Image (tube, coloured by chain):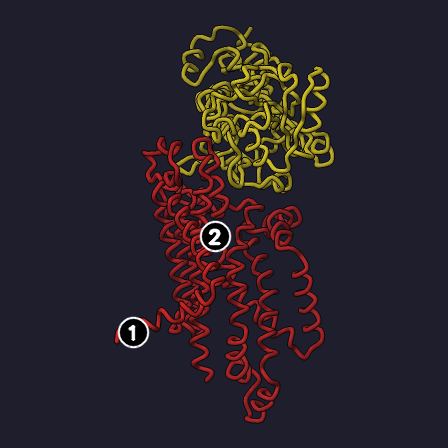
Chain colours: A yellow, B red
Amino acid sequence: MKQHLKKMAGLAVLACMVATPQSAAAKSATVQKIEDRGTMLCSGHNGSYFGFVEVNDKNEWKGLDIDLCRALTTAILGDPDKAQIVPLSWAQRFPALQSGDVDVIIKATGWTMGRDTELGLQFSLPYFFGGTQLMAHGELGISDAKDLEGGTVCVEAGTTIERIVADYLKTINVQHEMVSYEKAAELRSAYLANRCDAFAGWGPNLAVLRATEIENPESHKILNDQLSSEPIAAAMRQGDEDFVDVVNWMLAALLLAEEHGVTKANVEEVAATPPNPTVARLLGVTPGIGERLGLRETWAREMIAATGNFAEIYDRNLGKDSPYKLDRGLNNLWSHGGVLYAPILD
Amino acid sequence: MSAPKSDWLLKPLKQRLFRSPSDTLLTLLLGALLLYGLFVTLNWAIFGAVWSTEDVAACREAKGACWSVIDARHRLILFGLYPYELHWRSTLACAAIIATVVFSCLPFFWTAKRLTSLWILGFGTYYALMEGSLIGLQQVTTDQWGGLSLTLFLFSSVVLIGMPMGLGLALARRSKLPVISRGVSVLIDFIRSLPLLTTLFTAAVVVPILLPSWLQGDKIWRVILAFSLFFACYQAEVFRGGFQAVPKGQMEAGRALGLRPWQILSLVLLPQVFRHALPGTINMVVMTFKETAIVIIIGLFDVLASANAAFGTGEWAPYYMEVYAFVGLIYWTFIFSLGQYGAYLERRMAVVSH
């Protein structure tokens, strides 16, 4: 039966190759362009964005977004080193995508309606959720915002964060005093000078601050409450749905690999004796994952061998193996209390 | 008879600094403040500083600067994203550009033929070394160029292309044909009324959307051309000031002597125009050097962008002061040298004019 199906699939591919290019099996025009060029053009940064896009001591890019680009490059071209990172500023990223300077934007970019519609973009599955969080002095011994009763919270004046914190603390009925500061640096020094019990900011930024600019990181606690959350996703040009599929399944494969314990180290071992049908399909032992995207059957296996699964990428750049020690929190798998999930690989 | 000997030093000092009790008080106060500032700076930069990458652990406790960050990341600041093992090429290319600029400052090279061949040689060497494929080395595309070597390249290309362009525009603006002079003055005013950022953003980001790909060229060239045009429009006005400073009578005298128009221009007008325009020109050049940092917005990895990347990683994030101090020193070195060269030129021309 299996053999029969394989033959059928082969025939279908053949038929498609004979037919007009438009109807060729789900081969994305962008992927075709990337293959012809031999390199994948990804977005970098004009400098560095902690944890997501950085440059190491050997003048090479690293970071969560860079690793995702390298994973995508491996999926399409089979070699992570074929990723070409184009430095872009924040303002430049969308025009650069439209003009074809980059193939995809993976650059801590939030999914908003304006970008999705007016700017003519398409977004992938969110791969990161970052939102407003609170950091408090460790000696208070608290781990949730509800324990801030009667305390002082510092925020940056005039930002959305100010409103979010006020709304949240009102909702959970915590009496507090809010002190706002004009500049981020003032805010930081006010907090460090014990002017306030806690202060609010974008989660990853708080973690970076705690890891880098505070002398004793252990004496500060990022509270568990997630006050707001912004979905971070890859952005692509409108009009190439097949490329969106490729990017989505690249992310899905990384999450599935994590869920099933497939890592950079054991991927070949697991591929030799897949523990269940999903893993067999994921690693291309049972065909389908490649052909349906117009890629190689082993793309996911090669990708995991090159960059590791999602947990490995996260831990290396933001999590426990990085200087930032950012908890997974929302950015964990659904099965571990997070909101990341992969579509079903059938 | 030893008093007169030390008089040349003590007397003016006494007159200028300690003339009255209030003067003395002010002198002592300001002197103490200056000394204190110097002490704090030196203490931070030298005495309390940690110097090497290996000692980075000591940085957390150190009272002074943590120069380890420069030790570890100076290659990033100097060469940006250029491949690590090919940095010798970037170094040589940098040297070629600096040499070209230094040589073009020497009076020996001040003939059109020598200057042109020097520039072609200098820029050819830079490009061949940086890009590589022309001389059989591994190719490095322009999006990987960066750091100080990119800043120097941008700066010198903009000045070298913009300077003759500015002179051309200034001459065109003096043209007797109203079509040309009006057209050029509209162009100059148009470009000058746009911010540099807009001009560069258009060249880098908007042009590729509008033009077909075979007309676009590399981003870096589009940026250099747009920047040069911007420079030229300002420089044209500096030159125009120089032209206006030359009395009309000299032109008429030249004509009376039977000189051809281009002879009047090159023998009578231009030498004086250059002299009059010199302070303004040096000003423009210095500003351009600093303004190259604006290309960070269009994603070119210049020295400031790579400095930003140098402290933009977990382990080096607390030491941004050191990185900025280092980059500041680089800028200061170049701009101070330019200023000194300008002063030398003015002295030299003063000798000629009298």
Of the pair A240 and B290, the residue shown nearer to us = B290
Q: Is residue A163 left or right of residue B92?
A: right
- Under mark 2, the amino acid is Thr
Q: Who's the residue at 42% across and 56% down the image?
A: B333
**Disc 2 or disc 1, which is closer to the eye?**
1
Q: Which residue is mark 2?
A: B151
- Of A91 and B178, nearer the camera is A91
Q: Is residue A159 left or right of residue A185?
A: right
Q: Residue at x 41, y 12 (%)?
A: A269
Q: Amino acid at mark 1?
A: Lys
Q: CA distance from mark 2 to mark 1?
A: 51 Å
Give the farthest residue toward the front: B21
Q: Residue at x 58, y 28 (%)?
A: A195
A256 or A137, which lies in front? A137
Q: Is residue A239 above or below residue B140?
A: above
Residue A230 x/y as whole percent: 65, 25
Secondary element at image label 2: helix
- At label 1, counting other C-alpha atoms closer than 10 Å, the crowd grade (few under 14, some 14-19, many 20 or more) is few
Disc 2 to disc 1: CB gap under 8 Å: no
In the current view of this chain or complex, which residue is farthest to the left?
B1
Q: Secondary structure at mark 1?
A: helix
- The residue pinned by badge 1 equals B5
Q: Is residue B258 above or below residue A266?
A: below
- In the rendered structure, the residue with mark 2 lies on which chain? B
